[in-house]
Image (cartoon, rainbow, N blue to C red):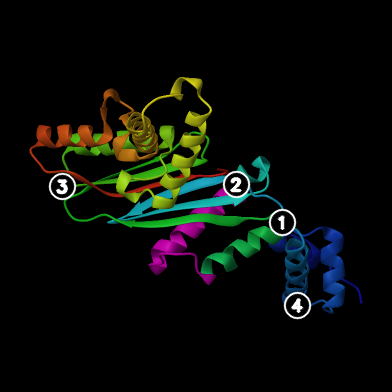
Amino acid sequence: MAINMADIKALNKSTGAGMMDCKKALMDANGDLAGAEKILKEKGLAAMASRTDRATAEGVVFIKQEGNKVVMLGLTCETDFVSKNEDFVAMGNRLVDITLANGYTKVEEAHTKALEELTIKVRENMNISKLDVIEVPAGASVATYVHSDKKTGAVVVVKGSEAEAVKTFAKDCCLHMAAFTPEYLKASEVPAAYIAEQEEIFKAQMAADEKMAGKPANVIEGILKGKINKHVAGICFESQMFVKDDKKTVSQKIEEVGKEVGASLSFGDVKLCVLGK
């Protein structure tokens, strides 16, 4: 049957598929646009399924606040070129809006269905690598930050005050998170299995160190404990030296800011998203 060029162009615009693919799909669907679009979608999904092992190390971090809710979403793709595409950016914002509008707290079918459309059109693997929904309690300060490369984002909630000094501190904490990318909030959150593994590593290093030879067991144990404490401090947000004051830890700094504003401050949700890590 004869296929109208206007229909081919319309199908090309709606699906992003090549002109010849659109023409063939229309022929297979006997000229029905909806049927042709379904055929192209099915073919596109099948093609993408065969490429699911391809890495998605590029992408963009999206953060948006509405009222007392903040959504941080990491959307990944295969290439830097696609991550800068306006359709990709629009999709990230759409996924955030879907989250807020429906009160979602995790990736749902509505997200995957929306993303499916762009995946087929662009022909690259795409994934929602991270989705955090933060509720800001009353009387708390919240700050957000997305680094210039769009691959690192942070959200920090400080409970106890909405003073400007606290808001500024929360923003500085976001910068700190992006700069030092701590793995845990505080030492008590570090898994025992992780600490045990690090102890074995340090023991092996010390056993190979000639300077350790002949030292009493209690001395070696003390050195080992010091190494573990230093290592844990380096990977925990609250015990790291603060990005804006390297003479104080983050926990010391929040106490200092609390005294300045006359409030007892504590951290609420502290979230970090680093794409490609």
Q: Give the structural element (helix, strand or loop) at label 1.
A: loop
Q: Which residue is mark 1?
A: 53
Tag 2: residue type? Glu
**The disc labelled 4 sits on which kind of residue?**
Gly
Question: What stretch of residues is rendered in magenta?
Answer: 87-109
Determine which of the numbered discs, if any, sits on residue 94 in the image.
Answer: none
Residue annotated with mark 2: 86
Q: Residue at coordinates 69% horizontally, 63% vertically from top-left? A: 14
Q: Which residue is mark 3?
A: 160
Residue furthest to the right in view is 1
Residue 67 position, x and y percent, is 28, 56
Which of these two is toward me, 14 or 153?
153
Q: Which residue is mark 4?
A: 35
Q: Earlier in the sequence, mark 1 or mark 2?
A: 1
**Residue 74, percent across and down?**
51, 51
Residue shown at 16% from the left, 51% from the top: 139
- In the image, residue 33 sits, relative to residue 61, either above or below, namely below
- Quarter of the figure with residue 254: top left
Query: How many numbered discs, if any?
Result: 4
**CA–CA distance in space, label 4 to label 2:** 28 Å
How far is the residue under mark 1 from the one under mark 2?
25 Å
Mark 1 residue crowding within 10 angstroms, few (<14) / some (14–19) / many (20+):
few
